[in-house]
């Protein structure tokens, strides 16, 4: 079966979110051990999120919970994309450094 035939209650998503112009600035530890496909989020770092949101919404039940990891400066733009794809933002969770890192949303 394809995923479109399922309706999940929870979705956790960690898409590639590094802006392609920032890839060369990553630390040696990240560049040597993480595959580029797991890091490169495209021109603004949100290409992967933008591509997957329609499918993410289709596979979640109404009021299903979704958690999207984002880059350090992407909260505002990612929130707009997520909202545009029929999600309601519930919370933006900060990491230990105080950076907005995860958007918690529900499917509407």
Image (cartoon, helix red, strand yellow):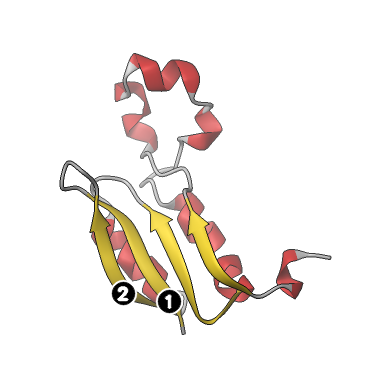
- Local packing at callout 2 (Cα closer than 10 Å; few below 14, some 14-19, many 20+) is few
Compared with 54, 72 (above or below) is: above
* Secondary structure of the residue carrying numbered label 2: strand
Name the side, left or right, on which 59 lies relative to 28. Answer: right
Do the residues under discs 2 and 1 have CB atoms within 8 angstroms?
A: yes
Task: Point out residue 20 in the picture as x, y percentages from the top left corner.
Answer: 39, 35
**Quadrant in the picture for residue 6:** bottom right
- Residue in the picture at 40% in, 44% down: 17
**Quadrant in the picture for residue 28:** top left
Task: Point out residue 62 in the picture as x, y percentages from the top left corner.
Answer: 53, 84
Q: In terms of depth relative to the viewer, which is nearer, 66 or 22?
A: 66
- Residue in the picture at 19% in, 47% down: 99
- Local packing at callout 1 (Cα closer than 10 Å; few below 14, some 14-19, many 20+) is many
Q: Residue furthest right?
A: 1
- Residue in the picture at 49% in, 54% down: 13
Report the residue marked by disc 2.
90
The quarter of the picture where the N terminus appears is bottom right
Name the side, left or right, on which 12 lies relative to 92. Answer: right
Task: Point out residue 86 in the picture as x, y percentages from the top left corner.
Answer: 46, 80
Report the residue marked by disc 1.
106
Name the side, left or right, on which 31 lies relative to 60. Answer: left
- All told, the count of numbered labels is 2
């Amino acid at each position: 079966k394809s995923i479109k035939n399922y309706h999940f209650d929870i979705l956790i998503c960690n898409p590639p979110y590094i802006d392609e112009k920032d890839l060369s600035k990553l630390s040696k530890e990240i560049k040597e051990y993480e595959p580029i496909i797991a890091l490169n989020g495209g021109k603004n770092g949100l290409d992967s999120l933008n591509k997957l949101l329609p499918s993410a919404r289709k596979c979640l039940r109404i009021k299903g919970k979704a958690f999207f990891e984002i880059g350090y400066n992407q909260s505002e733009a990612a929130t707009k994309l997520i909202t545009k794809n029929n999600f309601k933002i519930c919370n933006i969770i900060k990491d230990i450094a105080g950076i907005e890192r995860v958007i918690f949303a529900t499917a509407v």
